[in-house]
Image: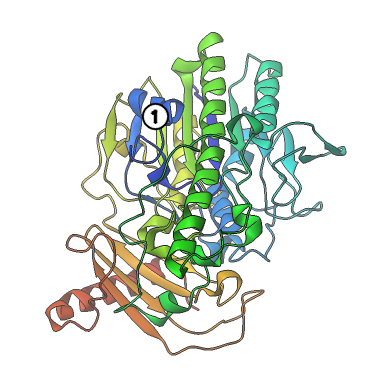
Amino acid sequence: MHSSRPNILFIMSDDHGAQSISAYNDQLIHTPHIDRLADEGIRMDNVYCTNSLCAPSRATILTGQYSHENGVRGLSEHFDNTQQTFPGLLQENGYQTGLVGKWHLGHGEAHHPAGFDYWSIFNDQGEYYTPTMIEAGGRKQVPGYATDVVTDYALDWMQARRTDEPFMLMVNHKAPHRPWLPAEKHKDAFNDMEFQLPTTFNDTYENRATAARIAEMRIEDLTEEDVKGTPPEGLTHQEVKEWKYQRYIKDYLRCVLSIDENIGRLLRYLDEEQLAENTIVIYTSDQGFFLGEHGWYDKRFMYEESLQMPFLMRYPKSIPARSTSSSIIINNDFAPTLLDYAGVQPRTPMQGESFRPVAEGRTPDSWRSSFYYRYWEHLTIHNVAAHYGVRTGRYKLIYYYGEPLDVIGAVNKPMEPEWELFDLERDPKEMKNEYDNPLYASVIEELKAELQALRRQYNEQS
């Protein structure tokens, strides 16, 4: 009865930049198990979040709605769990649903996970070692490393599931989120290596908006706690910065090693139980992350490293192996896509589109050629200015509107509005703002019109 309805294994990490997955970039790390999804399915190269922040992205993934519609614009706004979500719709339509790991959308009856038959989540951000797990019946501390613990819980749930019904399981890792604490087995990985600095590591933020210059997320801003030590005496400012980068990138990648290893465990289980053929497996992250590019760590900005989400998807029944796609996908699309594969219609419209035809190699001519982004918080953590913008295949137009509006936690410190335009074909590293270049006047006019059209389309008025 249910054999034609696919199982869904949705694996999501936190702050995992695509540049630290070898299927996307083989210069930093080898991730064979994540790469296996690309080898046996599709690697999507232009998947983007519409608000590069943990909680807002998670709310969008669940609902298919932009932040202003789902109510989670920043970290201080909690998720209303009575609204429509794709897990809830799957549950209503015969799926067993589970969630293990990071939730980060609030606690208490009104904000706990809903639409899941079973859930066990971290307390807020969660701890790397001996994490506290919260379930409907209470909470407990679980010995072990968080990435291993989450995978243990996922395997236990799949083993205990009802085999006569399809399942949807979300496996949400804490790693590689700050403070980048690796598993004991990986703590010495990369000790004998010196990583090459990103080409934009020493960005001076010239010819960029004020927002880039004032952001407090530079590698030199990393604390002793972040880098687990104090730089040797006598180093220059540049040498300290490079010393911190090596400490940072190694711990970050050590956390990624554990993610990759545990994805291997999940894929082996599907193989052993003969579930692989009829299971959609997705690996993604809630947003991208700066790994020294522009001299930064963290995310939030509409720049590429922060904006791009890794996205690999395997479904042997309909997705060709070793395929790639450059079509623009946004995280609003995840929910309608999974519902499409499950044969379930949302009760109320979602603001994303099913990219099932894109994944299966038959992209419609009408597929989107641009998308809308908005970061709502203003001068909060890392002092990043609020902004919105539009990205097309070639161009990116960003507007730093300079007003905190009413987002909880935003700092009431207005700034002079500024624009940035990047020609991604000529300047893929986004080092030169072309907004004042008269050669781009007609491009800017078209992009501003597109930006306003997208804001109207998504009912974004403020």
- Give the quadrant of residue 419: bottom left
Q: In this view, does 236 lie to the left or right of 138?
A: left
Extreme left residue here? 439
Quick check: can you spot residue 74? yes
Q: Specify the farthest residue to the right.
A: 138
- Residue 167 is drawn in which quadrant? top right
Q: Mark 1 — residue?
A: 35
Residue 229 to residue 326: above or below:
below
Q: Where is residue 205 in the image (x, y as percent from the top left)?
A: 35, 75
Mark 1: secondary structure: helix
Residue 285 in the image: x percent, y percent? 50, 45
**In the rendered view, does 293 fall on the left or right side of 334?**
left
The residue lying at 74 percent from left, 31 percent from top is: 144
- The residue drawn where x is 62% and y is 64% is 71
Q: In which quarter of the image is the N terminus?
A: top right
**Res 97 visible:** no
Q: How many marks?
A: 1
**Side of 303 where 361 appears, left or right:** left
Write the residue at 59% across / 54% down.
227
Question: Measuring 66% from the left and 57% from the top, which residue is drawn there?
Answer: 225
Question: Up-down: is 223 above or below 438?
Answer: above
Query: Going by the image, does 321 lie left or right of 55?
Result: left
Please state which of residues 288 and 28 is positioned toward the viewer in this rendering: 28
Q: Where is residue 40 in the image (x, y as percent from the top left)?
A: 36, 23
Q: What amino acid does circle 1 point to?
A: Asp
Q: In this view, does 232 lie above or below 316?
A: below
